[in-house]
Image (cartoon, helix red, strand yellow):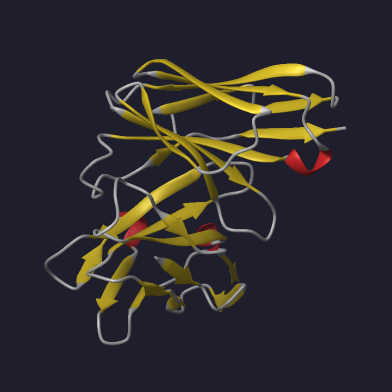
Amino acid sequence: AQSVAQPEDQVNVAEGNPLTVKCTYSVSGNPYLFWYVQYPNRGLQFLLKYITGDNLVKGSYGFEAEFNKSQTSFHLKKPSALVSDSALYFCAVRDPQGGGNKLTFGTGTQLKVEL
Amino acid sequence: ETGVTQTPRHLVMGMTNKKSLKCEQHLGHNAMYWYKQSAKKPLELMFVYSLEERVENNSVPSRFSPECPNSSHLFLHLHTLQPEDSALYLCASSQGWATGTDTQYFGPGTRLTVL
C-alpha cells in the first residue's frame, strides 16, 4: 500500500526567507511523487512531479523539490518566499506497482508567509 | 483552472433532494476523477473513468452516482445525502489512466452543504 505523510500542519516563514514544506512517503517500489497547491475556495493546482531522472525537480512559481530515496522524502522548497505563496500545499504519491493513476494525498500543510 | 470547469460552485440541499454536479474538461484528456475533500482529512478518491468506462469505485455509498457520457463530461448525481456528506467535491482529469505518470488537473470544486 502507498502512503504519504506531511508532518507539519502549518509552516510560518518571513517573506524573502527560504521555505521548506516536508513530505515523506511509503511505497513498495520506486515512487511517482507530486506537489499541488490550493488557494482558498479554489481547486488544486499542479506544481511539479518526479517520475524518474534528476532528483531535483523544478516546477511552477519558482518552486523545486528534491527526491531523496534513502530518506523516502520529497520536500518542497523555494529560495525566497512571497506573501502570495501563502496557501495549502499537498504532497501525493503513486506506487508504480499498483494499477492505474491512483494518487494518495497527504493531509496538507498550510504555508503562511508574513511580511 | 479554466481547463477543468465545475458547476455549480456552491450547492445547498436538503437530505431528501436530488441534485447533480457537473464537470467539463477542455484538455482533450481521457480520464476523469471525482474526489471528496473534507476539512482536516486527505483527499478521498471516489470514482475514476477512463475512456468513459468506470475503472475505480472506492466503496462510495450508493447515494452518490457517477455518470460519464463522453470523455469531456462527468456528472455526480446526488440523492438522499447525509449532513456528513457536506464537503468540497473536486473533479480532475488526466491524459490517461493506465501509465500512472500523467498529471491530474483539478477544477475549482463544488462546495456542497447538506442540511
Q: Is residue A6 visible?
A: yes
In the displayed structure image, the side of residue A19 where residue A57 appears, left or right? left
Give coordinates of residue B83: x percent, y percent.
83, 39
Give coordinates of residue A93: x percent, y percent.
37, 62
Identify the residue at horizontal 46%, vertical 79% (top origin): A17
Q: Is residue A22 above or below residue A87?
A: below
Identify the residue at horizontal 26%, vertical 74% (top origin): A67
In the displayed structure image, the side of residue A45 where residue B99 appears, left or right? left
Quarter of the rendering containing residue B63 = top right
User: Residue placed farthest to the left in the image?
Assistant: A53
Q: Is residue B49 above or below residue A89?
A: above
Q: Is residue A78 visible?
A: no
Quarter of the rendering containing residue B62 = top right
Give coordinates of residue B93: x percent, y percent.
37, 34
Give coordinates of residue A76: x percent, y percent.
38, 71
Q: Is residue B44 above or below residue A78?
A: above
In the displayed structure image, the side of residue B46 where residue B11 appears, left or right? right
